[in-house]
Image (cartoon, rainbow, N blue to C red):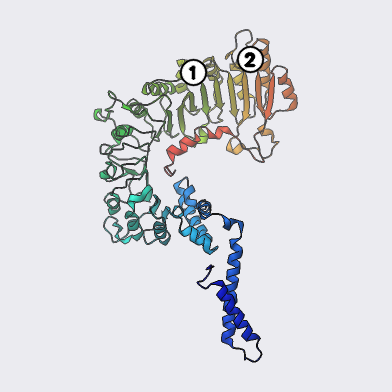
């Protein structure tokens, strides 16, 4: 069995036996050279024994294919979710692979003969990168997922020529194997790096290009030929930040996701979101469209008006549309949405920064979205969210039959919604109250008057005082038992405690996390007497005596305590959070 060296074990054993017999012969003087040979043979024999012993370990009895699959899970680069994680994951992979290849010869052979362990590659510098170059060799012919993080075009080169970058040159020779390419660079428009990428990459599906070390507030234009279709015919996902392209030259016949961040240009910003309509028209398979514009629109001119209003673009597969208007312009949003058509199942998100005025009425957004879809569903669920969850931004979302918007919008922009009749079929209403933007008693009355079909109400807020719940109870008909109460179909009510960051309870029994249900108990009693009882009430921590008071009028009363050694389980934190992050942050890996 040739386990460690090319010497057969029986021959080694025979040689040891012969040398020991010589050493045991008292007639022969001890030879130091012979002793060294015996010591070396014993060490070799010990290696054989340990190898045989390791071979009997359960883990080494697994087939090599199974071991290879196990090792793949140690590749941290295959689990990254944001570009911010790449460096840490790459360092972890280098360390892990180094350890695993030194455990034993069998593991080393398996790892070096498993291409799927090496086809996720992080190129760390513009000089020779040993780990990246070795990975390119060991990855065989598998498709490549490559992260190239390098900026500051090398001094002494013209427009950042890649001739002095052997790792990039090696990657360029394997462009035909690229499946996903992530570039975090500061290349200029005329950089020779782009020319190296203008090769046919028939299987590339994902391209993400992020600009760093910005010298100008304007986006860098990419070579138009990159997006004409002949180089990347299978491209499905494209994400750009601080880099832009000519929309009229783009051809994305298979594109499913388009994310554009920080798209700025003094010459072209007058068109706003509508600038991208030609590229969108060339992308009939789009399922996700995210546009984030940080700069205000230059003064509008007639030529800057959308050209697709009379002939809207059809996007029959669109699932997500998100617009980030960090310098808000309501006409820009409405003009853009008027130029596209999408299914009723498309989820729509619009975000705006809080220090700019949001002047678009909620009902106008809903009506525009409905005109842009072939048909529309009635709104069954309404949510008013706390803007602090999304960094104080304005937020609007229409997801299927659920309408969500933040409470920091001006009251007059919401008023037309309450009077529009759009909410007449809402059955679920979730109100996350904000200390910074509290609703007045008069608006509560308008809200519940607009919700005649309401069945389930959730009220969540940071204050432990009874003001919030008292306003809710009064708007629902408390002390007005002589007349029909608002929301006659209401059958369940939840009163929850959602703390501000500076009011997080310090202990599990902190009084600040107790909800005062007095107004709810009075409301339940009056509704029971009027023949419209509440069937279920859920309270965030409530004294036993108060629960008993409620149980006289409500069939099902329960108490919840969202605490597991620390505050947690707050669904309020998730409202709009994920899509806001995706719209704001270009570092998310596609």
Image quadrant in which the C terminus is located: top left
> Which residue lies most toward the left here?
303
The residue where tag 1 is placed is 423
Asked whether residue 212 is in view, the answer is no
Question: Looking at the picture, how far across and down is residue 137, in whole percent?
Answer: 39, 59
Give the number of the mark in front: 2 or 1.
Answer: 1
What is the quadrant of residue 588 in the picture?
Answer: top left
The residue where tag 2 is placed is 478
Image quadrant in which the N terminus is located: bottom right
The disc, 2 or 1, on the residue closer to the chain's N-terminal end is 1
Residue drawn at the location 46% of the way across and 17% of the way down: 422
Relative to 368, 33 lies left or right: right
Question: Looking at the picture, how far across and down is residue 148, in whole percent?
Answer: 38, 52
Q: Is residue 372 above or below residue 107?
A: above
State the separation of the CA atoms marked 2 and 1.
Answer: 23 Å
Question: Looking at the picture, how far across and down is residue 158, in whole percent?
Answer: 26, 57
């Amino acid at each position: 069995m040739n386990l460690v060296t090319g010497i057969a074990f029986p021959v080694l054993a025979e040689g040891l036996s012969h040398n020991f017999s010589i050493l045991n012969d008292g007639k022969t003087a001890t030879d130091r050279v012979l002793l060294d040979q015996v010591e070396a043979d014993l060490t070799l024999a010990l290696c054989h024994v340990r190898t045989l012993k390791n071979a009997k370990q359960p883990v080494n009895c697994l087939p090599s294919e199974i071991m290879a699959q196990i090792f793949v899970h140690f590749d941290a680069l295959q689990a990254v979710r944001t570009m911010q994680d790449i460096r840490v994951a790459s360092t972890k992979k280098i360390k892990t692979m180094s350890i695993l290849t030194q455990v034993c010869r069998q593991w080393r052979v398996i790892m070096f003969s498993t291409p799927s362990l090496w086809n996720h590659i992080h190129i760390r510098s513009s000089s020779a990168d040993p780990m990246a170059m070795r990975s390119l060799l060991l990855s065989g012919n598998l498709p490549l997922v490559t992260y190239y993080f390098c900026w500051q075009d090398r001094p002494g080169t013209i427009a950042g020529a890649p001739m002095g970058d052997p790792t990039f040159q090696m990657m360029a020779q394997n462009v035909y194997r690229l499946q996903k390419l992530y570039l975090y660079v500061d290349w200029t428009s005329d950089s020779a790096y782009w020319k190296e990428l203008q090769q046919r990459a028939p299987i590339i599906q994902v391209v993400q290009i992020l600009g760093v070390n910005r010298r100008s507030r304007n986006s860098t234009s990419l070579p138009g030929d990159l997006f004409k279709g002949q180089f990347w015919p299978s491209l499905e996902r494209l994400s750009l930040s601080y880099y832009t392209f000519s929309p009229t030259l783009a051809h994305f016949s298979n594109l499913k996701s388009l994310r554009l961040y920080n798209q700025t240009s003094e010459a072209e910003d007058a068109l706003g979101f509508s600038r991208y309509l030609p590229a969108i028209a060339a992308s009939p398979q789009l399922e996700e469209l995210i546009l984030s514009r940080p700069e205000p629109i230059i003064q509008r001119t007639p030529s800057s008006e959308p050209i697709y209003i009379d002939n809207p673009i059809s996007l029959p597969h669109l699932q997500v549309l998100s617009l980030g208007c960090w310098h808000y312009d309501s006409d820009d949003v409405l003009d853009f949405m008027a130029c596209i058509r999408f299914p009723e199942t498309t989820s729509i998100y619009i975000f705006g920064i809080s220090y700019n005025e949001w002047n678009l009425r909620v009902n106008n957004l809903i009506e525009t979205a409905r005109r842009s879809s072939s048909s529309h569903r009635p709104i069954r669920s309404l949510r008013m969210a706390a803007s602090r969850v999304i960094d104080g931004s304005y937020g609007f979302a229409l997801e299927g039959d659920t309408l969500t918007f933040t409470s920091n919008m001006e009251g007059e922009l919401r008023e037309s919604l309450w009077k529009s009749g759009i909410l007449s079929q809402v059955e679920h209403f979730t109100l996350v109250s904000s200390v910074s933007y509290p609703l007045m008693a008069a608006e509560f009355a308008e809200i519940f008057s607009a919700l005649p079909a309401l069945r389930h109400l959730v009220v969540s807020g940071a204050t432990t005082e009874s003001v919030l719940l008292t306003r809710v109870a009064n708007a629902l008909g408390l002390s007005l038992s002589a007349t029909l109460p608002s929301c006659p179909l209401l059958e369940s009510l939840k009163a929850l405690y959602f703390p501000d960051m500076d009011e997080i309870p310090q202990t599990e029994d902190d009084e600040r996390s107790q909800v005062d249900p007095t107004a709810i108990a009075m409301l339940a009693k009056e509704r029971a007497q009027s023949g419209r009882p509440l069937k279920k009430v859920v309270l965030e921590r409530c004294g036993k005596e108060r629960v008993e008071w409620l149980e006289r009028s409500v069939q099902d009363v329960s108490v919840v305590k969202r605490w597991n050694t620390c505050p947690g389980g707050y669904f309020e934190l998730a409202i709009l959070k994920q899509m806001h992050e995706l719209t704001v942050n270009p570092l998310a890996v596609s």
